[in-house]
Image (spheres, rainbow, N blue to C red):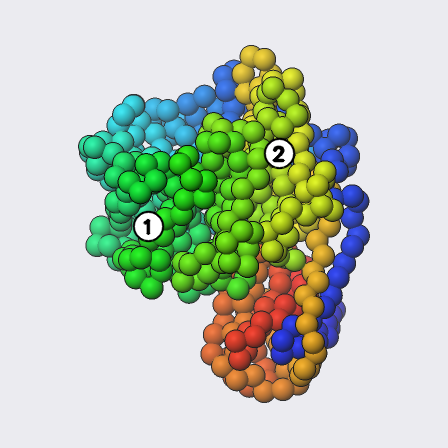
Amino acid sequence: MNFFSKLIIFSTSFSMSASVYSQDGSLDPTFDNDGIVTTSIGSGNDHGNTIRIQSDGKIVVAGNSGNNLAIARYNTNGSLDNAFGTGGIVTTNIGCANASGSDFIIQLDGKYLIGGYCGIFPSYDFALTRYHINGSIDNTFGINGTAITAILNAGDQGLALAIQNDGKIIQGGYTDNGSNGDFALIRYHVNGALDTSFDIDGKVITSVGTANDLIRAVAIQDDGKIVVAGYSYTNPSFSYDFVVARYNINGSLDNTFGTGGILTTAIIKNTNDYAESIAIQADGKIIVGGYSYSGQLLLARYMPNGSLDNTFGTSGTIATFFGASYQNDYSLALQSDGKILIGGYSLLNNTNSDFTLARYTVEGTLDRNFGTNGVISTPIGTMDDIATSIALQQDGKIVLAGRSHTGINFDFALVRFNNTITTDLKAFETKAIELTVQPNPFSTETMLLSSSTLINATITLYNSLGNSVKTITNVYGNIVAISRDKLPSGFYFIQLKQDNEMSLIKKLIISDN
């Protein structure tokens, strides 16, 4: 059966809203009865470093258990998924000591990639391992499922992952040049081989400041350019500052961004500021989240050219006291209504750290309709609880993942919160364009039929997490075909841009049925 959705787009924007969930920020009792799940994997410390949501709603957390990689997959109710690995859990000895699953992503074909590093201190190398969706190792990737790459002769640590639209894999981190650390990027083909079209040998090294430079997050723009966030020790401030750098597809720095492709921002003067996460808005603006040694959560928003966005917070930056001055892997997520979620941990309500989540408006103020004045602090156990990653479900609910100390060691920990996503884009109606999407849902291809002729328009598809997954440029005429390609089933949003004006359209649904 074909479904038809009539979507009205105004040439400036339109208004729509939805409010169907429980109080924003409350614990979700449908998730293991109390909204909280902990999982013991090994006999030592279990670190849940990254969380992702599959297109079928299952929740996947990856990290490490002792010296092994570890993955746990959960059903939507918080129970372990017995169809995955052994009782919902997979651990892997990759044959390289001290493996660290620093970041984790799901490919369009459903396969899992865990990136990190391994080795004996101080001689670490980048490491990347791929799994089938059932948890078995994908032996077609690298050597026996793992690609291990040395950049220089000293310590190399892979800390962040991203996938390009063509399936190539970007891994970012740092390399030790013998005196200090520099930004390091690697690009792999889909089979795990180094991509030599990326700066000749597949590796890019960038020196930013006078001491250690680390990449902590990587994102891919719609045009394929690579944006990284991290921190660097700089002489002007004599401290660590936020650093954002942008690279062209071939690995060269993009000189149209910042100064020579690099931008440094000191948010809290005379103290260390650490950028830990990055997200790119639909309008191309770049949001970076992190923390300061003075105990504050930090956010900065940049224009596409690298200048600070003065419409955000105070001159483009935000500092919110969270009371955590030691390493805090704050993680970002963008709601489809433009609101910003950032999760981590704090000492706001306890002498021990608790999972902490904040929501900000598009303008950069704390959203008072979320939690307590925009902030939620959730204890799991009686000792330290450390959130390191955030994910948004298709229904808008928020899941924070990390680790919780039992008094003996750390276990994987997850918390799910209720959440409302309301799109409210207000503007004056000027010229209406009527679009018909047929069919919707669809399995292989759908058609957009426009009542007015489109001229040099751009159509972008975003997944439920707000990430761009498909872009169609130079659109002319009244009919546009949108093919599924390798996109997984699930909910998507369309954005149409014409005459430098953007409008957001309702959901598209890709179904396998």
Q: Left of 60 or right of it: where is 151?
A: left
Residue at mark 2: 356
State which quadrant residue 439 falls in: bottom right
Label 2: which secondary element:
strand
Examine the rendering and report whether any part of residue 351 can be seen.
yes
Disc 2 packing (10 Å; few <14; some 14–19; many ≥20): many
CA gap between label 2 and label 1 equals 33 Å
Residue at 66 percent of width and 77 percent of height: 10
> Looking at the picture, which amino acid does disc 1 mark?
Arg
State which quadrant residue 399 falls in: top right
Tell me residue 152's x, y (percent).
Answer: 21, 37
Q: Nearer the viewer, residue 95 or 276?
A: 276
Label 1: which secondary element:
strand
Tell me residue 475's x, y (percent).
Answer: 51, 79
Residue at mark 1: 187
Q: Left of 31 or right of it: where is 126?
A: left
Residue at 25 percent of width and 34 percent of height: 180
Disc 1 packing (10 Å; few <14; some 14–19; many ≥20): many
Compared with 320, 482 (above or below) is below
- Mark positioned earlier in the residue sequence (2 or 1): 1
Residue at 31 percent of width and 57 percent of height: 259
Examine the rendering and report whether any part of residue 79 can be seen.
no
Tell me residue 456's x, y (percent).
Answer: 49, 81
Mark 2 or 1: in front is 2
> Looking at the picture, which amino acid does disc 2 mark?
Thr
- The quarter of the image holding the N terminus is bottom right
Compared with 139, 246 (above or below) is below
Q: Nearer the viewer, residue 340 or 348?
A: 348
Compared with 199, 75 (above or below) is above
Tell me residue 170's x, y (percent).
Answer: 37, 49
Q: Nearer the viewer, residue 231 or 471?
A: 231
State which quadrant residue 230 falls in: top left
